[in-house]
Amino acid sequence: MKIAVLFGGDSMERDVSIASASQVVGALRSRGHQVIAYDSGRGRLTAADERRLFERKIDRRPPDKTTVTTLPTVVSAPDLADVDVVFLAMHGGSGEDGTVQALLDLAGIPYTGTGKLGSALGWDKDVAKRLFLAAGVPTPDWLMAPVSTQVAAERLGFPLIVKPNGQGSTVGLTLVRTPPELEPAIELAFDYDAEVMLERFIDGRELTVGILDGEALAVGEIIPSTGPIFDYAAKYQAGGAEEIFPARLTAEQTARIQDLALRVHRALKLEVYSRVDFRMDADGGFWCLEVNTLPGLTEASLLPRAAAAVGISFPELCERICRGALARRPAGSKPG
């Protein structure tokens, strides 16, 4: 296949996108595919550009907003029109909220992952949680800002989570332990999005379920070394968390959480692959936190590790994602 790996974007997760793209490019080339690397802000990379950019490491802090590049209209680029499929190695912002997906649909260019509707539903945490409940999947209670400290305390209790409604990688997220910490946390979250969510904190185990081609992969457990939540630093610094695949659950618990993840995947109209994150409370109850429509794709990322636990190598995973895109819309087909 001739594949363009599209990465970069205009979100705070640009560095994560670069890391995913670098490994996806290598994995697909190792399977014999013709692959070009395409930075949404710069265009097609030369071999020298690839080496220079892909050697970058993910900083333990999210990038400053002033360093994030804007997203041009990439779908008119001849390099993308001439490929069999575009592999979306983008994370956050217009790369994950349905914008790029809609543009590629209009251009009739096949792309990996979920379509524009499912991407938009998954990116809006408030809407996604409503769909979780409609599908019979428990999710922690929540409120949308503005909200008084008194109402938050009565409804959600402390500690609680404050996070932007439209961000990934826990960018702008705060675990608020006491009432005086609430307002600064809300202000921080508003720096990253126009909508802010307050969510009841579930004290317990962090679990994740990857989905590929309509089947749940091995359940993973994440044990952060930096505190009770799997924040940006824990995700992207060495030793930030212990990640266990498969998670130490009973067969019944494994089947139950996999069923919940599949319900979420279907309810949000997700396609080919996704990752669904949960907390497990002290009573063994599972609470869905959110869904990742374009989860990280380095060999050390959670979805590839879940796949590896059931015998799917990283290059095979990347290739299956591409083939899933072509099964949905063959190369050369026109948008409906």
Image: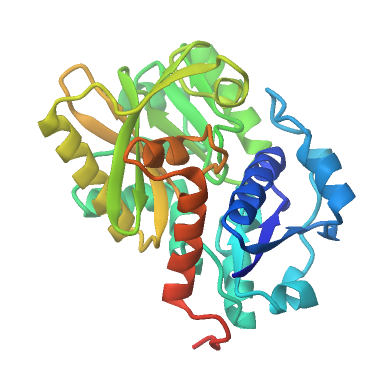
Q: Is residue 321 above or below residue 17?
A: below
When asked about the image quadrant of residue 3, the answer is bottom right
Quadrant holding the N terminus: bottom right
Between 180 and 237, which is closer to the camera in this rendering? Answer: 237
Coloring applied to the structure:
rainbow
Q: Is residue 110 above or below residue 114?
A: below
What residue do we see at 83% from left, 56% from top? 45
Q: Position of residue 27 (x, y in %)?
A: 59, 49
Residue, far left:
252
When asked about the image quadrant of residue 256, the answer is top left
Q: Is residue 137 visible?
A: no
Q: Position of residue 6 (x, y in %)?
A: 68, 59
What residue do we see at 57% from left, 77% from top? 105
What residue do we see at 53% from left, 86% from top? 335
Q: Left or right: where does residue 252 sit relative to residue 154?
A: left
Q: Position of residue 112 (x, y in %)?
A: 52, 63
Q: Left or right: where does residue 206 sit relative to residue 257?
A: right
Between 207 and 158, which is closer to the camera in this rendering? Answer: 207
Q: Report how many numbered discs are placed on residues in the image.
A: 0
What residue do we see at 65% from left, 39% from top? 16
Q: Is residue 134 above or below residue 331?
A: above
Q: Left or right: where does residue 64 sit relative to residue 296?
A: right
Q: Is residue 82 visible?
A: yes
Q: Left or right: where does residue 133 sit relative to residue 31?
A: left
Q: Position of residue 253 (x, y in %)?
A: 15, 31
Between 125 and 111, which is closer to the camera in this rendering? Answer: 111
Q: Is residue 133 above or below residue 99?
A: above
